[in-house]
Image (cartoon, rainbow, N blue to C red):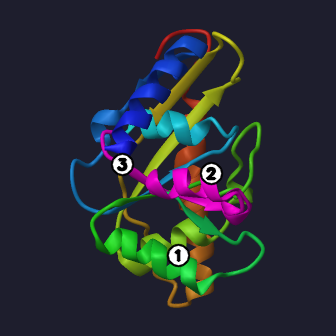
């Protein structure tokens, strides 16, 4: 209930602040686990994705956001959970896999930090790790635009796909899978036109 109320309020706020148009969300799976992967421009991104996606997204968020007890309570009730960006956290890995095992959508920003435009070379291995270990599809999403009052924000959701990584070595599989994920995101991002509605 809390999630749906916040989602409704944030959706209203987004419609007032920005000119958001989306495409491809008919590709979003109606059931089953998946790893949603998107480029990251702003802290508004999770809000936009949470409102456009037809199902709740369980986002990883940097652990510093959970230091305030009240904000941490809000985040946890919005299905977010903390991640240590400095090193591999076994607890976080287990939590992410549990989210997928329960049939939910795990939301991640493979670049790990905010960037003006997505680059294939900037992919981290985390998203690929979850997709490979849990054997679930990846949902690529791209967001393009600038979050200023009434500016155009365009969002594209691609078709879910399974990573094609069969090198026989986990480190190589993760690198290859990460490049596949960011390649899909970059392809969607390049196809978004801010001059015309999509």
Q: Residue at x 54, y 12 (%)?
A: 16
Quickly name the residue at label 1: 129
Is residue 165 visible in the rendered structure shown here?
Answer: no
Quickly name the residue at label 2: 71
Give residue 73's position: percent from left, percent from top: 54, 56
Q: Nearer the viewer, mark 2 or mark 3?
A: 2
> Where does the N terminus fall, quadrant-wise?
top left
First in sequence: mark 3 vs mark 1: 3
Q: In the displayed image of the protein, which residue is found farthest to the front?
A: 70
Measure how far apart labels 2 and 1 are at the Cα level. Answer: 28 Å
Q: Residue at x 53, y 79 (%)?
A: 93
Q: Is residue 62 magenta?
A: yes
Measure how far apart labels 3 and 1 are at the Cα level. Answer: 21 Å
Give residue 123's position: percent from left, percent from top: 67, 61
Q: Does residue 154 sit above or below 86 in this rendering? A: above
Along the line of sight, the residue nearer the viewer: 160 or 89:
89
Q: Does residue 41 sit above or below 98 in this rendering? A: above
Span highlighted in magenta in the image: 54-79
Q: Quadrant of residue 39?
A: top right
- 12 sits left or right of 143 in the view: left
Q: Is residue 77 magenta?
A: yes
Which element is circle 1 on?
helix
Which element is circle 2 on?
helix
Label 1 crowd bin: few (<14), some (14–19), many (20+), radius 10 Å = many
């Amino acid at each position: 209930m809390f999630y749906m109320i916040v989602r409704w309020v944030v959706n209203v706020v987004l419609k007032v602040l920005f000119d958001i148009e989306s495409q491809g969300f008919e590709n979003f799976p109606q059931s089953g686990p998946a790893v949603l992967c998107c480029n990251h421009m702003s802290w508004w991104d999770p809000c936009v994705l949470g409102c456009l996606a037809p199902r709740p997204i369980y986002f990883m968020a940097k652990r510093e956001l959970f230091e305030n007890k009240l904000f941490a309570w809000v985040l946890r009730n919005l299905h977010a959970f903390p991640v240590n960006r400095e090193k591999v956290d076994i607890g976080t890995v287990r939590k992410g896999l549990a989210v997928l095992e329960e049939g939910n959508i795990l939301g991640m920003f493979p670049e790990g930090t905010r960037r003006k435009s997505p680059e294939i070379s900037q992919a981290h291995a985390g998203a690929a790790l979850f997709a490979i270990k849990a054997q679930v599809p990846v949902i690529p999403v791209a967001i393009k635009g600038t979050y200023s009052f009434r500016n155009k924000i365009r969002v594209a959701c691609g078709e879910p796909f399974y990573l094609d990584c069969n090198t026989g070595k986990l480190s190589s599989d993760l690198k290859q899978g990460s490049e596949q994920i960011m390649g899909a995101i970059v392809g969607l991002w390049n196809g978004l036109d801010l001059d015309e509605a999509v």
